[in-house]
Amino acid sequence: MPLQRKSGDTAHLTELPTLREAIVKRPITNVIADKIAGLIASGILQVGDPLPSERELSVALNVSRDAVRGGIQMLAAKGILEISQGARTRVRRSDVGPVTVGFATARAVDAYNLDSVHAARLLVERQVVTDAAIGIDARRIVQLEALLASQKSALDDPVRFLISDREFHVAIYQASPNRLLADFSTDLYAYMMEYRREAVGRPGAIATSYADHVAIVEALRAHDPVAAAEAFAVHTGRIYATTQLLIQGESGSDA
């Protein structure tokens, strides 16, 4: 029997990264702590980085500021984050332990080469996005529009944009009825995030990604599976191209 959600459920379930966690409803502060730990494990947040403000994180993660504050305090108690009076909370250390992204641990997909991951994304995401476009509901569209607004306010902030970017992609994947493919897509999305972070820091990169996201949401809102899949393929192609350039550049510098 497929997992059913009550209509009143909010981010408590929709934000969970794995089917296993979706079976048992967990406190939202634990979910947010895991999300921030996942951002650190994947390389989106790095040691020494200041976290976005509680308000910015609450918008990006689609939860209350109290939930964000609780998640931060949990990680601070473990020594992963450092809270200082009158200063931004910062990442203190990166050894957050094993963190599940979709159904694999963070960085597990990094063991594969770029071409393999890109081919897998084109194949799997086409099906996931096609299914999402057919069955996406108004609540999910509202969530995506809120994430677009968050991204528009972060056009000069690569880290904050990437946090919202991850939520945007996962929200679309989770709109698919095939939860296995949704989790697999989440794993593929997390590929080589340190390169993705560098890529979005380049002039015009965030604005281009934001425009891609707008086109994707327009297709989803219209329930147009062909347009949604094509818009997603364009976006994935840009990610592939920029990641390839960065990997080749790093290889060249090591030669």
Image (tube, rainbow, N blue to C red):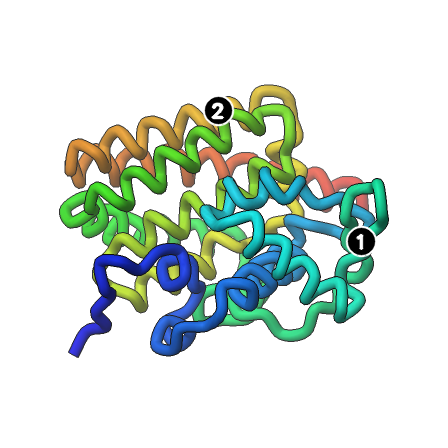
Amino acid found under the numbered disc labelled 1? Ile
Residue indicated by mark 2 = 208
Compared to residue 143, the image places residue 8 above or below, namely below
Q: Evaluate whether residue 92 shows in this view.
A: yes
**On-image quarter of the N terminus:** bottom left
Give how far across and how far down residue 6 sits, in percent: 23, 64
**Which residue is found at the position 50% from the left and 48% from the top?**
61
Residue indicated by mark 1 = 83
Q: Residues within 10 Å of mark 1 (few under 14, many from 20)?
A: some
Q: CA distance from mark 1 to mark 2?
A: 34 Å
Compared to residue 185, the image places residue 151 above or below, namely above
Give how far across and how far down residue 9 sits, in percent: 31, 60
Quadrant for residue 148, please give it: top left
Query: Between disc 1 and disc 2, whose residue precedes?
Result: 1
| Residue in front for this viewpoint, 39 or 85 | 85
Quadrant for residue 110, please give it: bottom right
Q: Residue furthest front?
A: 66
Q: Residues within 10 Å of mark 2 (few under 14, many from 20)?
A: some
**Which residue is found at the position 62% from the left and 74% from the top?**
98
Number of disc labels: 2
Q: Is the C-beta separation of discs 1 and 2 under 8 Å?
A: no
Q: Evaluate whether residue 244 shows in this view.
A: no
**Which residue is found at the position 63% from the left and 24% from the top?**
156
Q: Which mark is residue 49?
A: none
Q: Secondary structure at mark 1?
A: loop
Does residue 29 appear to the left or right of 77 in the view shown?
Answer: left
| Disc nearest the viewer among 1 and 2 | 1
Does residue 76 appear to the left or right of 98 in the view shown?
Answer: right
Q: Secondary structure at mark 2?
A: helix
Give how far across and how far down residue 201 sits, in percent: 66, 31
Give how far across and how far down residue 164 sits, in percent: 51, 41
